[in-house]
Amino acid sequence: LRGEDDLDYRWGYFLPSDYADELEFEAEPPMVLLEPQRSIHTVCQSSGKGQFGPKILEHALRYAEENGYTITGPARGILLASVCEEDKLNGYFEVWIPIA
């Protein structure tokens, strides 16, 4: 999304702020707190082993361009589920793409 290598992504974990508050969880480096920001919110599917990459976001990027939005940072998301369907591994991702 930032014009970098197509495979420039990092895996980590995500804890919603209401859970963090209830658990009295404190973010310590290298963890970061992600502030709310205006975003395109979508769900994407990656089908087949090794198929995860920026191409799964093409529909959201097209939507941004068609509606005059500018992408202001890297996409962030979570893996909702990884399931075997029709003998293929499918990943379902919830994604937020920051925009202006």
Image (tube, rainbow, N blue to C red):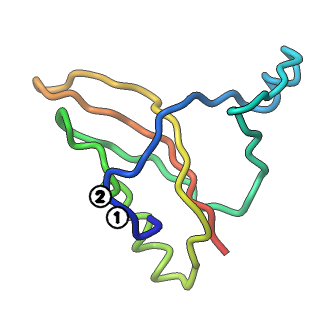
Pointer 2 residue: 55
The answer to whether mark 2 and mark 1 are in CB contact below 8 A is: yes
Residue 70 versus residue 9 in the image, above or below: below
Instruction: State the quadrant of the C terminus.
Output: bottom right
Q: Position of residue 15 (x, y in %)?
A: 69, 27
Which label number is shown at residue 58?
1
Image coordinates of residue 61 in percent, x first then y, are 43, 69
In the rendered image, which quarter is residue 46 located in? top left
Please name the amino acid that badge 2 sits on.
Lys
Q: Work out how far the residue at label 2 is from the one at label 1, CA to CA, in angstroms.
A: 5 Å
Quadrant assignment for the N terminus: bottom left
Q: Residue furthest left?
A: 87
- The part of the image, by quadrant, that contains residue 39 is bottom right
**Kind of residue at disc 1:** Glu
**Which residue occupies 73% across, 39% down?**
32
Observer-nearest of 87 and 50: 50
Residue 74 image offset from top left, x and y in percent: 54, 58
Crowding near pointer 1: few (<14 within 10 Å), some, many (20+)?
A: few
85 is higher (above) or lower (below) than 52: above
Looking at the rendered structure, the secondary structure element under dot 1 is helix
Would you say 99 lies left or right of 82 here? right
